[in-house]
Image (tube, rainbow, N blue to C red):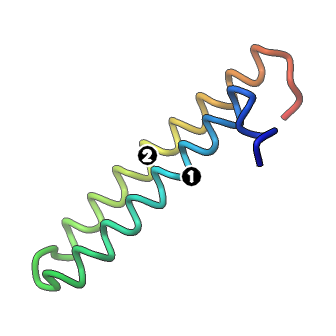
Amino acid sequence: MRERLESDLGFYYAVGGFIIAVFVVGMAAFALINPDGVGTVELVGLSGGFFLFMLVYFIAISVQRLEDGDSI
């Protein structure tokens, strides 16, 4: 595990995974605490926006890999 985190790209992937985990745990906790608090429309909008954010994040990582000459 340590070898993966020593590179910049490994660190970026770890941060991306951590962000996804925090989002999922946060949404699950919110659903348990206040089940009627988020409607379907809000949940779709929130999840869709988060998905787009993470898509751009991982595309940026791929672009950096291409700039460094690493193979995808």
Q: Is residue 6 above or below residue 15?
A: above
Residue found at the very far right of the displayed protein: 71
Q: Helix, strand or loop at disc 1?
A: helix
Q: Is residue 30 left or right of residue 52?
A: left
Q: Could you tell me which residue is drawn at 43 percent across and 46 percent down? A: 52
Q: What's the residue type where badge 2 is placed?
A: Leu
Point 23% across, 84% down: residue: 32
Graded by Cα atoms within 10 Å as few (under 14), some (14 to 19) or many (20 or more), the crowding at tag 1 reads: few
Q: Residue 68 vs residue 52: left or right?
A: right
Residue 35, image x, y percentages = 17, 85
Quadrant into which the C terminus falls? top right
Q: Earlier in the sequence, mark 2 or mark 1?
A: 1
User: In this figure, what is the number of numbered marks?
Assistant: 2
Question: Disc 2 and disc 1: Cα gap in Å?
Answer: 15 Å
Q: Secondary structure at mark 2?
A: helix
Name the one closer to the observer, 71 or 41: 71
Q: Position of residue 29 (x, y in %)?
A: 28, 75
Q: Position of residue 40 (x, y in %)?
A: 22, 76
Dividing the picture into quarters, in which one does residue 3 lie? Answer: top right
Label 1, on which residue? 17
Q: Residue at x 33, y 76 (%)?
A: 28
Q: Which amino acid type is shown beneath numbered disc 1?
A: Gly
* Residue 52, disc: 2
Q: Nearer the viewer, residue 50 or 14?
A: 14
Q: Residue 1 vs residue 36: left or right?
A: right
Question: Can you tell which of label 2 and label 1 is closer to the viewer?
Answer: 1
